[in-house]
Amino acid sequence: MKNKVKKSILGVKPYIPGKPIEDVKREFGLKSVIKLASNENPYGPSPKVLKAIALQSKSLNRYPDGGCFCLREALSKKLNVDPGQLVFGNGSDEVIVFAARAFLKEGDEVVVAYPSFLIYEIASSIEGAKVNAIPLKDFRYDLKGMIAAVNDRTKIIFLGNPDNPSGQYFTQKDMEFLLGSIRKDILVFIDEAYFEYVDEKDYVDSIGLIKKYKNVVVTRTFSKMYGLAGIRIGFGIADLEIIDLLNRVREPFNVNSIAQAAALACLNDQAYYKKIKKELFVQRKYLYNTLCKLNLDFQETCTNFILINVKSDSSKVTNDLMKKGVIIRNMDVWGMKGYIRVTIGTEKENTRFLKALESVI
Ligand SMILES: Cc1ncc(COP(=O)(O)O)c(C=O)c1O
């Protein structure tokens, strides 16, 4: 069958997600396993969101609203953009796929950082585009290097802000510099999956950028801070023309009705998420302090995950932790030798991780 498919997909390396808890329990015969591997919210969505989900589940026989009317209205008010400037996806991953599907064909090129979130590369490769991956410099995007990699065939630049796995962010100045240095017909895709965690004062005002630059798309998600990773909903914000183009490659009922109701309820319960953010900052400090005591280097992060140099074989450390029921991510496979990425969990989970780490390094 291989000669029957699109040639471009043969070179695609499938994305390998963090191992599910149940798999690890089965594989190692463990009763209790914690997962700190996919940057999820360890507390789950708010009780009000769970109520909204229960209520919406009574209408499961009906197709969802393909236009996400109620959520669109609420978000457009919150973000102060036109309702038509929003596109919804089955996770923000899907909006990355829309951009690749709508803009890329064989012979086109994209620019990404390396390592960065792998879906940029996978979605682009599927469409047959060449991926120019510019290595990080000291864990930060090499913006000058990325600009230098732009050529006549470049269609999209993908930027994680904050980025995964580095946990670093762009400032307003960085983004203005990039946007002022490239052609206006290159789509600048700013992935803000971790937006809600960022407190840094000089973090870019991406909604402001969209008003100024017609070639910018910003994506956000309900999977991370809002704790809805399991029901998949994210969205993109851009100029009306770009959103119209992205909507053309979207399936009519791509976002399910439960996800729409849950996302709307999240927006209406900001107090719950404020508490979660506060606790995250406490736990982040706890992890930093203990990692220092363990004499391990790490990247300070503006997100809910930390990149840690375990100063040894990170693949072995990852496996040894898994045997102890702690799932984290080995960054060796993302080209960061000796590094692991750990999601900040609850206090109990973090303590268990730190104890397990100390015993395996
Ligand atoms: C940088 C980045 N973008 C996007 C996503 C995907 O999020 P979603 O669940 O909305 O598809 C992730 C998930 O890990 C991520 O780390």
Image (tube, helix red, strand yellow):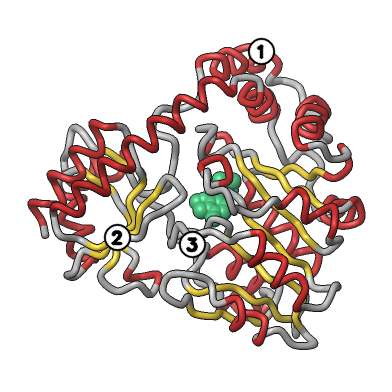
Q: Is residue 25 left or right of residue 173?
A: left
- Give the Cα separation between the discs numbered 2 and 1: 47 Å
Task: Look at 81% across and 36% down and name the residue there.
Answer: 80
Nearer the N terminus, badge 1 or badge 3? 3
Task: Look at 32% across and 70% down and name the residue there.
Answer: 332
Nearer the N terminus, badge 3 or badge 2? 3
* Residue 15's disc number: 3
Q: Is mark 2 within 8 Å of ligand 1?
A: no
Name the residue type under label 1.
Lys
Q: Is mark 1 within 8 Å of ligand 1?
A: no
Nearest the viewer among 27 and 131 is 131
Q: Is residue 108 left or right of residue 272?
A: right
Q: Say which element carries label 2.
A: strand
Percent x, y of residue 160: 58, 60
* Residue 58's disc number: 1
Camera-side mark, 3 or 2: 2
Percent x, y of residue 232: 59, 39
Camera-side mark, 2 or 1: 2
Name the residue type under label 2.
Phe
Nearest the viewer among 173 and 1 is 173
Name the residue type under label 3.
Tyr
Check contact, mark 1 vs mark 3: CB within 8 A. no
* Residue 298's disc number: 2
Q: Is residue 13 left or right of residue 88?
A: left
Q: Quadrant of the C terminus?
A: bottom left
Percent x, y of residue 124: 66, 71
Task: Look at 54% across and 77% down and name the residue there.
Answer: 142
